[in-house]
Amino acid sequence: MRKQDKKVLACVDQSRFADTVADYAAWAARRMDAPLELLHVIDRHPEQGSGEDHSGAIGINAQEHLLSNLSDKDAAIARAKREQGRIFLNRLRERALAAGAPSADMRQRHGALDDTLAEQEDSVRLFVFGRRGVSAETTQRDLGRNVERVVRAVHKPILTVTEGFEEPEHVMLAFDGSAVTRKGVDMIANSPLFKGLPIHIVMAGKEGADAPKQIAWAKDTLTAAGFEVVADILAGDPEAVIAREIKARSIDMLLMGAYAHSPLRALIFGSKTTDLLRTATIPTLLLR
């Protein structure tokens, strides 16, 4: 598959975040001129019991009849879920096409989300899915609970979004000189996703001896690619600095490394993981 044919894969559940996921996925697909696929994963968890009393002696061949009856019910539930999912996906497909996605397909799968995405990875340029915001209702279908597991399972960029779409106008890269954030610089330079948008590069935390050289490389690389770039090295706790600068600069999309061996790693997988994912107010593109 040619790179330009690789898709934006939007993972959606039947929650109120699905429209936002579809909107950001359509935005990315339009910017990259890439096909969009909407994926709805139906888990295999058994449904709750019907409440009927199946205990005790219920006659000869009871077990066989009971198993047959339960099997018929399970099949009916599965059919209803598939049909409900098809209607749900078709509405999102129409929404994405109206938002400018070049094309939009839809697919339903049974299974675990992380396994399903890992299987799809070779044909994907960008994953998009939602995470819970501060006002999110708790739901068993909440994709936010799967963020860490999914990021561990795949190796392509993952855009995690909060509720409500706003077309990005100011982008920040949390840069630490690691291989993954250097890869992020190259991705920005070579992808049409952020073309024409100003890029802020922020190195936060304790300044290393080679920090000026590293941030100069990042700035020069993006400037040479035609970007307007603001680059700063700022002292302080990385999480606090990034949160402050997002607000001060009106940043509406953050790019950062996942699994980088640096203080930034704690932003996603350290002790503050849950707090960050609940309080972050802007979409975050996780680089792998």
Image: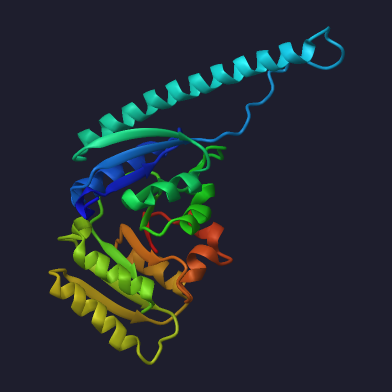
For residue 186, what is the image quadrant? bottom left
Which residue appears at 83% of the width and 9% of the height? Answer: 58
Q: Residue at x 39, y 25 (%)?
A: 86
Report whether residue 271 is seen.
yes
Q: Quadrant of residue 191?
A: bottom left
Q: Residue at x 39, y 38 (%)?
A: 39
Residue closest to the eye, 265 or 247: 265
Residue 139 image point, x, y percent: 55, 37
Residue 71 pos. (x, y %)? 63, 18
Asked if 228 appears above or below 48 in the picture, the reply is below
**Is the residue 223 above or below the residue 285 in the image?**
below
Residue at left 36%, top 79%? 177
| In the image, farthest residue toward the right | 57
Q: Is residue 274 above or below residue 138?
A: below
* Image quarter (top left, top right, bottom left or bottom right) of the C terminus: bottom left
Camera-side residue of 206 and 79: 79
